[in-house]
Amino acid sequence: MTDTLPHVRLLPKANARAVRHGFPWVYENELVTDRRTRNLEAGTLAVLVDAERRPMGLVAVNPNSKIICRMLDRNPEAVIDASWFASKLQRALDLRARLYDQPFYRLVHAEADGLPGVVIDRFGDTCVVQPNAAWADALLPALVAALQEVTGVKHVLKNGSGRARGLEGLDDQSGAMLGEAPTSAVPVAMNGATYMADLTSGQKTGLFFDQRPNHEFAARLSKGARVLDVFSHVGGFSLAALAHGAQSALAVDGSVAALELAEEGAKQSGFGDRFATRKGDAFKTMEALAAEGQKFDIVVCDPPAFAPNKPALDKGLRAYERVARLAAPLVADGGFLGLCSCSHAAELSLFRNASARGIGRAGRRGTLLHTGFAGPDHPLLPQLAESGYLKALFFRL
């Protein structure tokens, strides 16, 4: 196969050792980009060779992306077909089956599960696939066939939304690849509550499985507590808190659709009478709650990625500091403040410092009680910092 596929070559200055030791990407400035390489179609499979032309593995090439090569297999003779996909998926499934009693989890977490750029979330007999790299988009039929074979799911949906696909030059088309898309939200049981996941028009794949252990930690603090859940989406923190004995919970979000799903989840969980929602801009709503003299025993803020890349880092850190500054006055003395970031560019120490500055600027003093990360269905590839994007800090004020 190495004789039939095109070869792409690292520049002498490229860090070949990093690639050999597991780093899964090659950037455009590390590759010899002659006319032949630039003319390769996005998603083309090729053999990566070092500057001395020694094979290093099988890669997918996208000349239109800053990540010009993604390592698919260290064996340059590998054949990327349904059988290859099935072996990767079976390995991923075996891990999740050990971790969870019910089939609701992230099944594939991209590079960390050996499928670069591919995200698959499972909701019972339905899987939602995000093929965020050109090679995966081109080979999606083989991936879907293997997914059905390995898991036995009846429905597979493609989610074409998201910034990553745009960076790869891909379209934003979504739809059913197998079976049918659900006509209503799917109930998902987690941490004692029922969450409603919109698999077709919700954020991402419909639910944030990554926050499951952080929801659980907040819930442990919640017995008898008044809880404020800011940037709540479908009620991630507030519903878990209510399931563990919170006195009341208020969910704040800018999306009417998300709050309606949260309300339905609270109703199906059996504690709709203790749950309330408030639609509005999170920053303005926190200012309004402070002006009203509102206090809560637990406040959790789980905003979108304010620093999705390095150019946005400074602005993003200021936004995280502002979140902490506005949230801290809403926490009763002795209460708890949870602050989350899903920005990989804002690594832990930077995010922690921004959060502490915000708390201090609000005139509060906090001790850091717990640092949380994504659940084990979102494994981290040690060589790739981007795979460890989620941080959750819990302070006692």
Image (cartoon, helix red, strand yellow):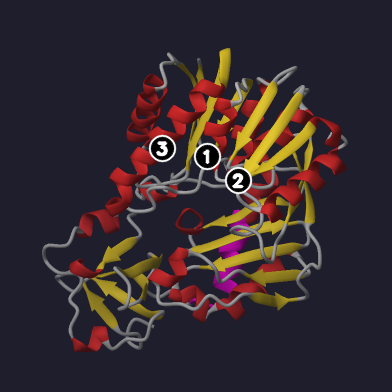
Residues shaded magenta: 80-92
- The residue positioned 35% from the left and 77% from the top of the image is 62
Amino acid beneath label 3: Tyr
Callout 2–callout 1 Cβ contact below 8 Å: yes
- Quadrant of the frame with the N terminus: bottom left
374 magenta-colored: no
- To which quarter of the image does residue 66 belong? bottom left
User: Where 81 sits versus 375, above or below?
Assistant: below
Q: Which mark is residue 320?
A: 3
Residue indicated by mark 2: 280
The CA span between labels 2 and 1 is 7 Å
- The residue positioned 32% from the left and 51% from the top of the image is 312
As rendered, which of 262 and 129 lies closer to the eye?
262
Amino acid beneath label 1: Lys
In front of the other: label 3 or label 2? 2
Residue 302 in sight here: no
The CA span between labels 3 and 2 is 18 Å
Tell me if mark 3 has few (under 14), some (14-19) or many (20+) residues whose alpha carbon lies within 10 angstroms of its own: many
User: Where 90 sits versus 228, above or below?
Assistant: below
Q: Give percent across and percent down for residue 248.
A: 75, 26
Residue indicated by mark 1: 284
In front of the other: label 1 or label 3? 1
- The residue positioned 20% from the left and 71% from the top of the image is 31
User: Where 91 sits versus 369, above or below?
Assistant: below
Predominant SS of the magenta segment: helix
Q: Give percent across and percent down for residue 230.
A: 59, 37
- The residue positioned 62% from the left and 75% from the top of the image is 174
User: Where 36 sits versus 153, above or below?
Assistant: below
Image position of 14 (left or right of 341): left
Q: Give percent across and percent down for residue 207.
A: 66, 52
The CA span between labels 1 and 3 is 15 Å
Amino acid beneath label 2: Gly
